[in-house]
Amino acid sequence: MNTAPRIDTTKAGISPAEWQTRVDLAACYRLVDHYGMCDLHLNHISARVPGNDEHFLINPFGMMYEEITASSLIKVDLAGNMIANSNPDYAINLPGYVIHSAIHGARHDVGCVLHTHTEAGMAVSALKCGLLPLTQTAMRWGKIAYHDFEGVVVDLDEQQRLVANLGDCEVMILRNHGLLAVGKTVGQAFNNIFRLERACRTQLLAMACNSELALPPQEIIARSNAQLAVSPTRDARGNVRPQGSIEWPALKRMLDRRDPSYQD
């Protein structure tokens, strides 16, 4: 059960747009837990506060993903100062601050940053070959970024290398560490980490068969990259929907049926 009191949005000066972002981010934490991508209370997902490039929301360090709610999220600025925290018993994780403030500060097109330590993600991060274009899912991105391991991410001077290696990519494999995904919205970031995780799991299953891997020809890989770069999703009126947008309301409806407390 969440021990943080629900925020009085009126008194706290929280706009409807920020509250919606809080609800979406809390839903993302619950979904990462639901799909088996959490590491106890570790790791972090952040979302930029709408209309404020200096502030982002992140989890209270020490709370399990399954108990995080919209009210419990901590608002922090790019310098690491806590702007709003409904429960003073919790603070933020230092590596979480270092990674997320770096990306939010450099990539203004990014609304959400998501980092995991899954078994499959860590295993692929330890392979010299990295993620191979073995499946359609693994070809979702034309570029996958890589960042070499420098130890626990607590030094601010690593931020510039982290950002430089990410470039304009949507996903990055942190060597000997784990996975990272970004998106314009929370839903898009979740879609990216979900697909990246499945691509890693599938590669490990294929490699475990101890048989020759069948890689498609390079021209087919490039063609697939180009096809998947354009969202195939359209709404009822035929309008193209961004990757990760059409399933996001459905995922939240699933959470509502199971446990709607993420909205508190």
Image: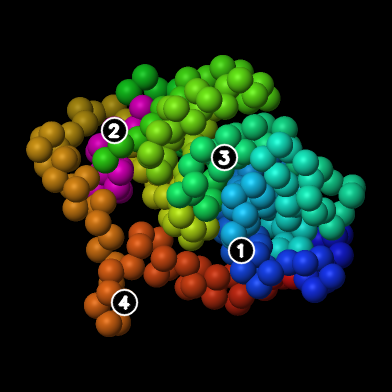
Look at the image and tell me whether residue 120 can be seen.
yes
Residue 133 forms part of the magenta stretch: yes
The location of residue 241, given as percent across then percent down, is 33, 68
Say left or right for 205 vs 17: left
Q: Which residues are magenta?
A: 130-141
Cα gap from disc 1 to disc 2, whole angstroms? 34 Å
| Residue at mark 1 | 21
Q: Secondary structure at mark 3?
A: helix
Question: What distance separates the C-alpha of mark 3 from that of mark 4?
Answer: 33 Å
The tally of labels here is 4
For label 2, the residue is 132
Q: Earlier in the sequence, mark 1 or mark 4?
A: 1
Q: Which mark is residue 105?
A: 3
Nearest the viewer among 212 and 224 is 224
| Crowd band around label 1 with a 10 angstrom C-alpha radius: few (<14), some (14–19), many (20+) | many
Label disc, if present, on residue 255 of the rendered structure: none
Task: Find the distance from the CA under tag 1 to the CA under tag 4.
Answer: 23 Å
Indicate yes or no whether the magenta region holds residue 72: no
Question: Disc 4 or 2, which lies upstream in sequence?
Answer: 2
Q: Residue at x 65, y 64 (%)?
A: 18
Q: Amino acid at mark 2?
A: Leu
At mark 4, the secondary structure is loop
Q: Of label 3 and label 4, which has the lower sequence position?
A: 3
Which marked residue is nearer to the observer: mark 1 or mark 2? 1
Reading the image, the residue beneath label 4 is: 235
